[in-house]
Image (spheres, rainbow, N blue to C red):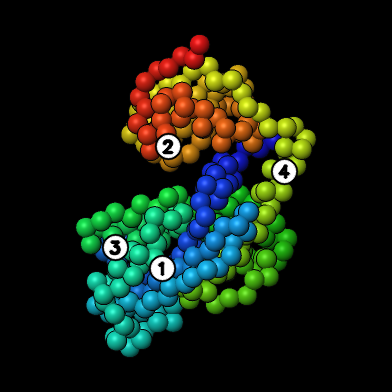
Amino acid sequence: MKTNNLWLNASKLLSAHKEIVVFDVETTGLSHKDDRVIEFAAVKYIINNFTLLESDALHLYINPERPLPEKITEITGLTDNDLVDAPKEHEVFQQIYEFMGDAVVAGYNSDTFDIMFLESMYLRFGTDFVPAGTIDALKMARDRITKKELKEAGKQEKHKLEIIADYFHISFTAHAALEDVRATAKILQIFINEYRKEAEEVAAQYGIVKPYIKRISYWKGFKWDRNRIYVSTSAGDIYYCQYKREWGAKAGVELDMLDINWIEKEAWRLTNSTNADEFLKFTGNKHIA
C-alpha cells in the first residue's frame, strides 16, 4: 500500500478550515522577480464535508506598465490595448490582499509559479503572503494519472491543465484566468473524491491506528529546509518537516494507516504546544515515560 503525503496533508487542511481560495495569474513572463501579473482570478469556496461550494469570486486585469511580449499575447490573447486602461498594481493590491486573506490556497502548478508571483507582489507592498496552507492540483494530477493512462486516452503525455481537464471532459478556455480557476477547482474536487474513497477503503480493510508515542525529538538537517521533529511511536518513526509543514515517515511506516490528526494533537500536548506554530518551535528531546 502506497503512503500518500499529498492527500494526507490536503485532507488535514480541508478538515481544519472552512474556506479555500483557488486562484490563477497570467503574467508578462516567467520571472516572479522581474515580471508582473496582468490578470488575476480567484474563487472562494466553502468546504462542506470535502465538497467545494463556490461563494465568491474576484477577477482583475492589471496594467503592467510595460509592453507585453508577443509570446504572452499569443498565449493569453491579451494585448497592450486590452490593458492600457486597466488599473495598475498599486490600485488593486488591497482588493487582492483582502480577498486572499490567510485562507488555504490552491491552484494548478501554483506552488512553483502562481504563489511565487503573489509573494513577490506582496513584498513590493511591504508585507508577506502567508496562506494557511497550499494544495497544488498539478502534483495530484501527476500522482493520480500516469503518462501511460494519458496516452491510452488519446491525450498528450503531459500534465498541463488543459490536457487533464480534457481527460476529465471539462471544457474551458485555457489561459483565461477565471476559467483556469474553475477548471482547476473541478479537477481538484475529482481528486479529493478519489483520494477519500481510497482512504475509506484502506480504513475499512486495515483500520486506523492510534499508536503509543515513545519519544519526540528535534533533528537539525544538513540544510535549513531539512529540519525535522521526529515522533517515535509504537508503529514506527514519523516526522514533521518544519519547512514544508507536513508529516512524513521513515521507510516501512505507512502514514495512511496511522491516525495522523490524533498523533499531531498528542505531539502538541506532550510538547506543551497549543497549535502547529508552537509545535514548529520545539527543539528538545522528550522521552515519554
Q: Distance between the residues labelled 1 and 3?
A: 12 Å
* Residue identifier under label 4: 200
**First in sequence: mark 1 vs mark 2:** 1
Q: What residue type is labelled 1?
A: Val
Give the residue at x 51% y 51%. Answer: 17
Q: Distance between the residues labelled 1 and 2?
A: 32 Å
Give the residue at x 27% y 72%. Answer: 89
Assign the N terminus to one quadrant of the image: top right
Q: In this view, does 63 lie above or below 201?
A: below
Disc 1 secondary structure class: strand
**First in sequence: mark 4 vs mark 2:** 4
Q: In the image, is 236 to the left or to the right of 230?
A: right
* Of marks 2 and 3, the one in the foreground: 2
- Corner quadrant of residue 71: bottom left
* Of marks 4 and 2, the one in the foreground: 2
Q: Is residue 12 above or below residue 81?
A: above
Q: How crowded is mark 1: few (under 14 residues within 10 Å), some or many (20 or more)?
A: many
Can you give x and y, in whole percent of width and height, for residue 146 in the image? 65, 53
Can you give x and y, in whole percent of width and height, for residue 231 in the image? 50, 24
